[in-house]
Each structure stands twice: as structure tokens, then as C-alpha cells.
Image (tube, grey):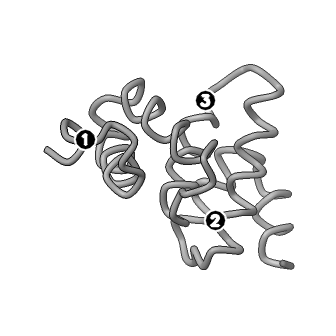
């Protein structure tokens, strides 16, 4: 409803993107790109964005996913979810790198 009234409602885009990651990944990515590009993504929206980009075979997307993980960690994301997504994006090397930060 919030998105119908204001399509650039970043908190609503953030939440919708995170909720749609498993069911409608293309739509989720569309929402998350808007929030990430605007600089309003929450830590867990950054994680969702990184997870969606982890499947890409494009090197630029892998770099964007890595950068999103680093931002997520700086914004306070912690725990197994960070490690799980880091492993998808860059394997154990990235998991260890994030632990050092």
C-alpha cells in the first residue's frame, strides 16, 4: 500500500525487497537496486542484495555483491546470515576477510 501511494518510499522498498528474495527474486532485485543506489538500504537489505547478485556470472555484479556485504557489516549485520551470504559471494576467503573487519 505504501508503494502505491509513494513509489520511492525507501523503507517500503527495503522491506518489500527483503521479503521477496526467495519468492520473486527479479522483483526483489528491482526494489533493492533502488534502495541501494539511493543509499537508504538497511544492513539486511544490503545482505539480500548481495545474495541476489551472488548468482550472477558477471564480474561487476560479484564486486557489487562484495561491496554490499562490507556495507552490511558496517551497518551492523552480524551472525550466520552474513557468513552464509559471504560464502555464496566469495567463498571462505571472503568469510575470513569479513571476520577481520
Q: Is residue 5 above or below residue 70?
A: above
Front residue of 11 and 21: 11
Q: Which residue is mark 1?
A: 3
Q: Position of residue 97 (x, y in %)?
A: 86, 67
Q: Could you tell whether 65 is left or right of 48 in the image?
A: right
x 76%, y 20%: residue: 58
Residue that mark 3 sits on: 55
Give the class, few, some or many, for how many residues have Cα within 10 Å of label 3's Cα (few <14, many ≥20): few
Q: How far across and down, in percent of the image, does residue 95 sit? A: 75, 63
Give the mark nearest the N terminus, 2 or 3.
3
Q: Circle 1 — which element? A: helix
Q: Quarter holding the N terminus?
A: top left
Q: Quadrant of the C terminus?
A: bottom right
In-front residue for pair 85/35:
35
Sequence order check, earlier mark of 1 and 2: 1
Q: Residue furthest left?
A: 1
Tell me how far mark 1 sits from mark 2, CA to CA. 24 Å
Badge 2 local density, few (<14 within 10 Å), some, or many (20+)?
many
When asked about the image quadrant of residue 56, the answer is top right
For disc 1, the neighbor class at 10 Å (few under 14, some 14 to 19, many from 20) is: few
Left or right of residue 12: residue 52: right
Label of residue 72 in the image: 2
Amino acid at each position: 500500500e505504501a508503494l502505491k501511494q509513494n513509489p520511492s518510499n525507501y523503507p517500503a522498498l527495503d522491506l518489500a525487497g527483503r521479503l521477496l528474495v526467495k519468492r520473486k527474486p527479479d522483483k526483489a532485485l528491482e526494489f533493492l537496486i533502488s534502495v541501494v543506489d539511493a543509499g537508504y538500504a538497511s544492513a539486511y537489505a544490503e545482505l539480500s542484495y548481495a545474495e541476489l547478485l551472488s548468482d550472477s556470472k558477471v564480474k561487476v555484479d560479484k564486486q557489487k555483491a562484495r561491496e554490499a556485504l562490507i556495507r552490511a557489516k558496517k551497518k551492523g549485520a552480524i551472525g550466520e546470515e552474513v557468513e552464509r551470504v559471504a560464502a555464496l559471494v566469495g567463498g571462505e576467503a571472503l568469510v575470513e576477510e569479513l571476520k577481520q573487519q
